[in-house]
Image (spheres, rainbow, N blue to C red):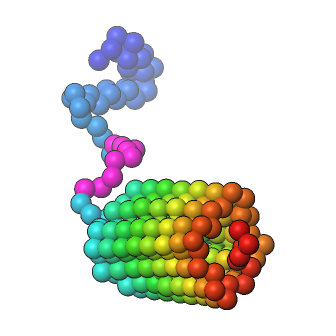
Amino acid sequence: MPKFLRCLTLAAMLLGGPALAAPVQLSAGQTDYPVITDTDDSPAGPLVIDGCTLAAGAQCPGVDLSHADLSGINLNGADLSNATMTRVNLTGAQLRGADLSGADLRGARFPMAQMQGLKALGADLTGANLDGTRLAGADFTDANLTAISMEASWAPKARFVRARIVAANLSEAKFYNADMALARLEANNIRFTIWEGVHMEDCSGCPVDW
């Protein structure tokens, strides 16, 4: 016991008071309370959300991934058709050949994602961010692309048949040989957008004189 505690204990005894209890001595590394460690390390094993194991080739139609942070994930060839994915973060994700047809992708984030051959038929991408994405051969037939941002995205031979593209940011996007037949374009930012070889038959608002 430290000297000052011995003095206090002796004084208490002389004055008729209770002696001070000796402090609990803990061995090295021993604690009497739980230790909580804050870490950014990802949990071991595949990511599972709403019963779906998220990995390349996953078969999870109708899964709910709303607000999930899936940045950088590999979902190549995955079936996420009719999924609920509002405000999901897929920044830098790999979605080559994935199926997002009928999915709710409002406010979703896809900056710099690899989405070649993606299927998003009838999907709702209102307010989604597709800046810098790679969309070669992607299919957005009948999709709602209102207020999306596709700045500097590459979409050669992508299909936007009957798609709705209104109030969108298409600045510096490249649509080489894309198909926009029967699409509706209105009030978009098309600064430095490339429309070379785009099929615009019966398209409303397409820059046919580009």
Residue 66 visible somewhere in the drawing: no
The number of discs equals: 0
Residue 178 visible somewhere in the drawing: yes
Please state the horizontal and vertical placement of residue 72, each as a whole percent of the image: 40, 56
Q: Residue at x 30, y 80 (%)?
A: 59
Compare residues 210 and 151 and report the one nearer the observer: 210
Q: Quadrant of residue 171?
A: bottom right
Please state the horizontal and vertical placement of residue 109, each as a whole percent of the image: 54, 63
Q: Quadrant of the C terminus?
A: bottom right
- Compared with 167, 104 (above or below) is below
Q: From the viewer's perspective, is 95 left or right of 168?
A: left
Q: From the viewer's perspective, is 163 left or right of 113?
A: right
Which SS type dominates the magenta stretch? loop
Q: Which residues are magenta?
A: 35-44
Q: From the viewer's perspective, is 36 left or right of 125?
A: left
Please state the horizontal and vertical placement of residue 35, each as a whole percent of the image: 34, 43
Compare residues 36 and 43 and report the one nearer the observer: 43
In the rendered image, the residue lying farthest to the left is: 27
Compare residues 112 and 190 and report the one nearer the observer: 190
